[in-house]
Amino acid sequence: MQRVTMMDVAKLAQVSPSTVSLYLRKPEAVSPSAGQDIARAIDDLGYVPNLVAGGLAAASSKVVSIIVPSIRNAFFAETVATLQAELASEGLQVLLGHTDYGENQEEALVRTALSWAPAAIVLTGLSHSLGTSKLLKASRVPVIEMWELGGEPLDMAVGFSHPQVGASAARHLLSKGRRNLAFLGARMHEDHRAEQRAAGFAEAGKAGDASICEIVNHPGAATVEAGALLLNRALQQVPDLDGVACSNDLIALGVLFECQRTGIAIPEKIALIGFGDLDFSASCVPSLTTIRPSGDLIGKEVARLILDSIHGSRPEGARRIVDTSHVLIERRST
């Protein structure tokens, strides 16, 4: 079957191809009657505009590039889903990239995204390769860095302080009378935000009256299985361990399972805190005390900044940085 072209749409709508092109880029610039005829022709013919061609013809395309460390991570999935829903109402489409926590991969994705002349680029975190930073600073594309605050953004930023998250976890455990603490994390040599949470936890623990405050890292992915390995390693390093914070809820679930397997009572023997407030956190037994980063709110605020930039009301100064904060949700594991 032959591909339907813009010429076919123009012929059926009885307008010029340039009018169809203008309608696809800026519908409000076309008269209502011509717009209705073009929309009807597009619907009748099943025409799908070529976004690359559109991006070359216009200052920018209707594509927003979103680059995340992991498509398996439910935190980022919530943010991306919210972003996609918010942007779709404005006719913007999402181009999703996955770095697997690699800065070189992120740079390659940014190069590809820029070739689409995107309406905006969304990155995760504030840490990027020098090449990525140069590419984005040289472009005229709005850039939003999400899920992290604490440094000067390339352009705009939406997120929260990860050291403060770690500090909140440590202070909560100390408030419960726990003094022998450990932070369990995975892949922290690449996951800089988890590393920051661990640092905030250690600093708050030492500033409080913790007897010991260890950081235990697993080199692999942050999974349920990693949680069991990390707990056993922590018990070797801190024999009287009575308070644990984890870099995410999956690791915390692994700790919980391993405690149940070995007969360690939670929270009587060990108080446990996760991060993320994933779906299972409220329903596991015991229910998991955790810290919610509000991934949906991050998505909404990122979308707002993108749309403001597209519509000409680009924020300046302090308004370029949006703090979505975090909330500690106390349940039965502490």
Image: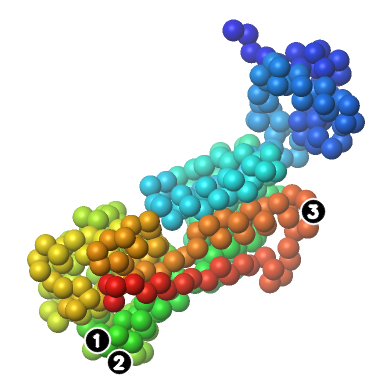
Question: Which label sits in the foreground, 3 or 1?
Answer: 1
| Amino acid type, residue under disc 2 in the picture | Asp
Q: CA distance from mark 2 to mark 3?
A: 51 Å
Q: Who comes first in sequence, dot 3 or dot 1?
A: 1
- Whether the residues at callouts 2 and 1 have beta carbons within 8 Å, the answer is yes
Q: Tell me which corner region of the image, top left, top right, bottom left or bottom right, holds residue 208.
A: bottom left
Q: Residue furthest top?
A: 1
Residues 193 and 108: in front is: 193
Is residue 242 at least partly visible in the picture? Answer: yes
Report the residue marked by disc 2.
Answer: 209
Q: Tell me which corner region of the image, top left, top right, bottom left or bottom right, holds residue 65.
A: top right
Q: Quadrant of the N terminus?
A: top right
Residue at 76% across / 21% down in the picture? 40
Q: Position of residue 238 (x, y in %)?
A: 16, 78
Residues 331 and 67: in front is: 331
Report the residue marked by disc 1.
Answer: 179
Is residue 200 at least partly visible in the picture? Answer: no
Q: Find numbered disc 3 in the image and state the secondary structure of the residue it sits on.
A: loop
| Amino acid type, residue under disc 1 in the picture | Arg
Residue at 56% across / 40% down in the picture? 95
Report the residue marked by disc 3.
Answer: 312
| Amino acid type, residue under disc 3 in the picture | Gly
Q: Quadrant of the C terminus?
A: bottom left
Horizontal placement of 257 versus 9: left or right?
left
